[in-house]
Amino acid sequence: MEQIPSPRTSGRRPGRSDVEYEYRTITLSRDTSRSEARRLLTEAAEHGHWELSRVRLYLGGRRQVQLRRRIVRVVRPS
């Protein structure tokens, strides 16, 4: 059905040096229905604070969805 590997951290986003994102790639097979894909992505957004970054549709119907979320670095007061 779908592969959900552990998230990876990317460097800083071009143009915004103060924002870093963590990325997760989910691969959905052609047999995954739209409602099932929507449910999976909604859960990731609501519970994991992920947002949709990119969707790729490949020949054969396989979809690769890339999610991202901001990495918040807390600075300790001195």
Image (tube, rainbow, N blue to C red):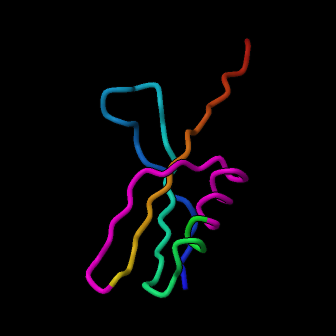
Left or right, 30 with respect to 71, comes to: left
Residue 53 colored in magenta in the image: yes
Q: Residue at x 73, y 53 (%)?
A: 47
**Which residue appears farthest toward the top when viewing the image?**
78
Q: Position of residue 32 (x, y in %)?
A: 52, 81
Q: Viewed as shown, does residue 3 lie left or right of 30? A: right
* Callout count: 0
- Report the quarter where the N terminus lies: bottom right
Compared to residue 42, the image places residue 78 above or below, namely above
Is residue 2 in the magenta section? no
Determine whether 69 is above or below 12 in the image: below
What x and y, as percent, mark residue 25? Answer: 47, 65
Residue displayed at 66% across by 22% down: 75
Q: Residue shown at 62%/67% (left/top)?
A: 40
What stretch of residues is rendered in magenta? 39-60
Residue 35, compared with residue 62, is above or below; it is above
Which residue occupies the foreground of this view, 58 or 73?
58
Residue pictured at 52% horizontal, 72% vertical:
34
**Picture coordinates of residue 36 (x, y %)?**
60, 74
Expressed as whole percent of the image width and height from the top left, the position of residue 68 reads 50, 49
Relative to 15, residue 56 above or below: below
Q: Quadrant of residue 60?
A: bottom left
Q: Quadrant of residue 61?
A: bottom left
